[in-house]
Amino acid sequence: MSVHFEEEEIGKGLRLDREHRALLWSYVRPHMRLFLTSFFALVTLFGIDLALPKIVQLVVDGPVIHFQETGMFELELLLPYLLAFAGLLGLQGFTNYKNVIWTSMAGQAVVRDLR
């Protein structure tokens, strides 16, 4: 008998979870644009986080190896990597800033609607 009771409780919990999700979704839906914008910013941040180490790898495999082989340091070989790295760092900072703002705005809008 206790097994049957536990199954009923589990089923009831799942039903309530679905009902709560549906209710929460009704509050989130009007602010979907903010949620999608912050999600896109988050995906962009993931891409930047993956690109920065790749640039370092390209610098080590390119200009640094060239310097070790020839003994000559050529800035024109290193400059595109430095500009790309600096640009991605700037984009990362801006995107992170905007992501925090958009995520906060979306969360606060949902909480405001709940009240």
Image: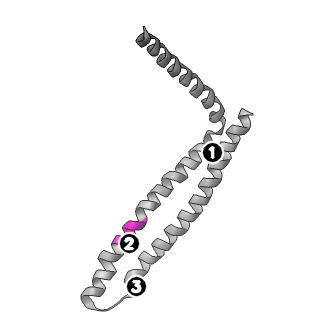
Find the distance from the CA under tag 1 to the CA under tag 3: 42 Å
Quadrant containing the N terminus is top left
Q: Which residues are magenta?
A: 52-57
Quadrant containing the C terminus is top right
**Residue ranking furthest to the left:** 69
Looking at this view, is 1 or 24 the one in front?
1
Quadrant location of residue 78? Answer: bottom left
Could you tell whether 103 is left or right of 9 in the image? right
Amino acid bearing label 2: Val
Residue position for label 2: 56
Looking at this view, is 85 or 112 the one in front?
112
- Percent across and percent down for residue 22 are 59, 26
Find the distance from the CA under tag 3 to the CA under tag 2: 16 Å
The structure residue drawn at horizontal position 41% and vertical position 13%, both measured from the top left corner, is 3
Q: Is 35 located above or below residue 85 in the figure?
A: above
Amino acid bearing label 1: Leu
User: How many residues crowd around disc 3 within 10 Å: few (fewer than 14), some, or many (20 or more)?
Assistant: few
The answer to whether the residues at label 1 and label 3 have Cβ atoms under 8 Å apart is no
Q: Secondary structure at mark 1?
A: helix
Find the distance from the CA under tag 2 to the CA under tag 1: 34 Å
The answer to whether the residues at label 2 and label 1 have Cβ atoms under 8 Å apart is no
Residue position for label 1: 34
The structure residue drawn at horizontal position 62% and vertical position 42%, both measured from the top left corner, is 33
In primary-sequence order, the first of circles 1 and 3 is 1
Residue position for label 3: 76
User: How many residues crowd around disc 1 within 10 Å: few (fewer than 14), some, or many (20 or more)?
Assistant: many
Q: Is 94 located above or below residue 65 in the figure?
A: above
Amino acid bearing label 3: Glu
Q: Name the colour scheme.
A: one colour
Membership of 54 in magenta stretch = yes
Eye-nearest disc, 1 or 3: 1
User: How many residues crowd around disc 2 within 10 Å: few (fewer than 14), some, or many (20 or more)?
Assistant: some
